[in-house]
Image: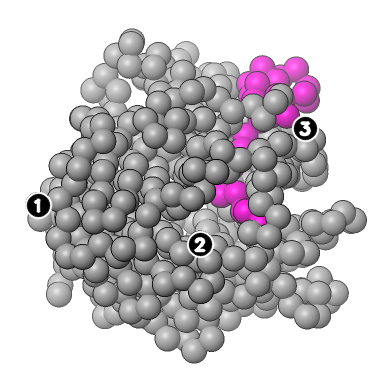
Amino acid sequence: MTIHRAEMLKILAEAMTPVEREYTDLELSVSGQLPPALNGVLYRNGPGRFERGGVPYGHNFDGDGHLCRFEFTPGRVRYTNRFVRTRAFCAEEAAGRMLWRGFGTQKPGGLLANGFRLRFKNAANTNVVWHGKRLLALWEGGAPHRLDPVTLATQGEEEFAGQLCNRFDPLSRWSTPLLPFSAHPQQDAETGELINFGLVLGRPSRLLLYRVDAQGVMTTPEVHQLDRFSFVHDIAVTAHWICVLLPFADFDIPRALLGLKSPAASLKLKTERPMQALLVPREGGPTQLIDAVPGFVFHIAAACDRDDGGLDLRVIRYPRFPALGDVEGFFREVEQSDGLPRLERLQIDPAANRCSLSPCSEEVGFELPTVSPGRLGAERQQIYGIGTPVGRRLPFFSAVQRFDTQTGELTQQDLGADLPGEPIPTATQPDQEDWLLSLVYRGAERRSDLLVLRAADLAIQATIELPHAIPPGFHGCWVSADSLAQ
């Protein structure tokens, strides 16, 4: 199947149509057979609106957070969707115009409207997690938003009993009253502990590490000083280590603060330089900073401890920082070079103070990786994600795929011109049959379906038809009925 760039751009532009309607407990039509074991709720987050007052946002990452809830009971699926009603969303909804700067968006009005405007809109659009009987919508530049797990009503910002209150210098407290809680926390399946991070601009800039126990109680954040303020989206956590990959994708702070550029446009990119791997022992002790490999990493698919004290990461590495704000430019760049993100193995040896990189699958692009839940630091045999079908040059992520880390085998479910989202595993125990749930945008029909795929071979078991189109989004989680009832 040949897909041309112009056709892809048209599909992507249509996919970014804003969500206009919110549904409540709507029963959805199902084709195929729902697995009887599916008993629980899929939550999924992503941007649902891309303009305000007729002015488009400057970057898709700034789209207003939109939650979908799919409740599975034997033979049935019911659907609810809601925008996350942050204070910024509600204020802009009332005003009918843009009131905040975003990650890649400047307010209309030039320098006067953007200069020294240090409070950026929390879009609450990147992930959603269930932990400590709280449903939290996450965005890495700000605090989480707590939601009702049934109605998806927004209940306010989650401060974790004041632990997220900023107690640093006055300027930092004024610009960021609540500390940022990133969108990629890692949960320890054995203890229930949630581990996350946040980055705070300042002199010095700081990396904050958060630990939240199984009951939702956060300890005092751990503070590590940084020489640079880099763009970090994800971390790796094993039984022994917390690893943060620091790329040379640093923000030009003066230009961003003066309002000359948005934070995204101010990034100073030197991705030909090796990233740095910051290693923090989970049980305490000195940190270690190791030169890694060039490039940029959005997502870390899996991390495991080695017997020699080192760790192995499966990372999605871009040869250079992708121009995601300019979709056509991104496609053109990839066509003219080899800019697809690949799944690769990054081995880190703290004793020798070095890293090495090797490819996993050289044939295809890979993004939005997921693994089934398990013990932190244990090796994962299967990594799921979306990818470019074998034989296609363009970075059109239209396949759900699975990579076997032991055999090197790659399996794909090619969806043609449709755009699948992150495949979310539903198994909660190692001995359970695993299913994948992926929200798919149907390009030709301009609507969305939810697919149920068998993880063992990616065969489509059931197709669940939505009443409207959902723009391609980011991350989500599966919560079993037993977990919700506890």
Task: Tell me what residue is drawn at x 59 percent, y 65 percent.
Answer: 374
For residue 112, above or below residue 2: above
Residue picked out by circle 1: 445
Magenta-span inclusion, residue 333: no
**Three-letter amino acid code at the position of disc 1:** Glu
**Three-letter amino acid code at the position of disc 3:** Arg
**Secondary structure of residue under mark 2:** loop
Task: Tell me what residue is drawn at x 62 percent, y 30 percent.
Answer: 254
Distance, label 3 to label 1, CA atoms, is 51 Å
**Three-letter amino acid code at the position of disc 2:** Thr
In the rendered image, the quadrant that contains the C terminus is top right
**Secondary structure of residue under mark 3:** loop
Residue picked out by circle 3: 203
Residue picked out by circle 2: 428
* The quarter of the displayed image where residue 53 is located: top left
Q: What mark, if any, has residue 121 been given in the picture?
A: none
Image position, residue 463 (x, y; %): 20, 60
